Each structure stands twice: as structure tokens, then as C-alpha cells.
Amino acid sequence: MNFLAKNFLRGLAIVIPTVVTVYILYQTFLWIDRLILFPFPGLGVLVMFVAVVLIGILASNYVIARLLAIPEAIFSRAPFVKIVYTSIKDLIEAFVGDRKRFSRAVLVTLANAPRVEALGFVTAEELSVIGEPGSVAVYFPQAYNFAGNLVIVPRESVREIAGDPGRVMAFIVSGGVSGSLDGNDTTRA
């Protein structure tokens, strides 16, 4: 009986993430196809991908970049739309834009306890504008969630770590089970 239970749980650990990921990808493909009204599955995703790449290429042209700035100017002035638009834009740029914000992974000493530390990312080095000149802003992502906390801490409580920010983010978001921070995956036996 122990053999069956152990192998059933091992099988679940393999099947559930795969099935859920495939299902989410499938539903995303269908949603994009319905959005663009293409009758062939996957064609809408291909068209969307090509369109986004073309917009990225065209955005390097000065005239087109000025035209693409018009919606941004409108969205960043509309009362409710401004909050939604700037939040989404800042979040996307934090990972892939020219102003990447999660590029400096740090360990933060918590509550004067020298052996209790948390992984996070420095998002603002200078906070004198809010009356905290000796502090930095550190974002702490939450495991298995798209949320996180922004904490203001004294600069001396922050110690930069030498890790790839992408690996550090994956390590945090997975609750520390995504593998090691040095690139060697030690979670699989």
C-alpha cells in the first residue's frame, strides 16, 4: 500500500503541473483567437505575436514612436485609467523594459535579528523625497502569488547578492523549491 501511495503522489507531482500549464496555455490561445476572430486555432496567437514584434520594430522609428506616445499621454491623464495603465506599464517594464527594476537582488536583515533575512529586490535607491534619505525601497515578491510587499528599510540592512535576478525571482516565487540560485537544479533526484 505504501508503494501505491508513494508512486501516486509522485505521479500527481508530475501530472498536475503539466496538465494545468497545458490547460492555461490552451485557454489563452483560444481567448486570443476569439479576440482576433480567427477560425483556425493558433493563428490568432501567431498574428498577435507578429503584430507585437512589428510594433516593437516600428517603435524604434522616431516618427512612429511619437505616434505611439499619444495613447500613453491620453491614458496617463485620465483619472481611473491612469492608475490601471501606469501600474501595468510599470510592472511590465520592471521585467522587460529599458528601465528594469528587478535587476538588483538583495538580502535584507529583518527586525535586528542577524540570522533572519529575506530575499527581495531594490526598486528605489533614493527616498529623500518621502523623508527617508538613509533608506531604500525593497520589493519582496510572495511565493505562489503575483503579489508582494514594498518595504522601506535602512540602507545598512540591505546586502546585495551575486545571483541572476531571474533565478532569484523564480526561487522566491516558487517558495524556494525551483532549484538552486547558482543554476544547478538540485530539486530533482
Image: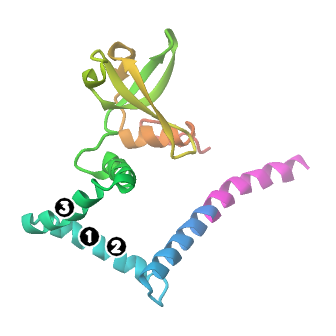
Disc 1, disc 2: CB below 8 Å? yes
Name the residue carrying label 3: 69
Q: Secondary structure at mark 2?
A: helix
Disc 2, disc 3: CB below 8 Å? no
- Residue type at mark 3 is Ala
- Residue type at mark 2 is Phe
Q: Which mark is residue 49?
A: 2
Corner quadrant of residue 44: bottom left
Query: Compared to 109, does 58 lie above or below?
Result: below
Question: What's the residue at 37%, 33% (across, down)?
Answer: 163
Q: Earlier in the sequence, mark 2 or mark 3?
A: 2
**Can you name the residue that lies furthest to the front here?**
79
Question: What's the residue at 19%, 63% (across, down)?
Answer: 70
Give me the C-alpha separation between circle 1 and circle 2.
6 Å
- Residue type at mark 1 is Val
- Mark 1 is surrounded, within 10 Å at the Cα level, by few (under 14), some (14 to 19) or many (20 or more) other residues, namely few
Give the label, 2 or 3, closer to the camera. Answer: 3
Magenta range is 1-19
Left or right, residue 133 beside residue 18: left
Magenta residue check for 6: yes
Q: Please state which of residues 6 and 169 is positioned toward the viewer in this rendering.
A: 169
Q: Which x, y percent locates residue 142?
A: 53, 38
Q: Which mark is residue 53?
A: 1
Q: Which x, y percent locates residue 51?
A: 29, 75
Question: What's the residue at 54%, 39% (across, down)?
Answer: 186
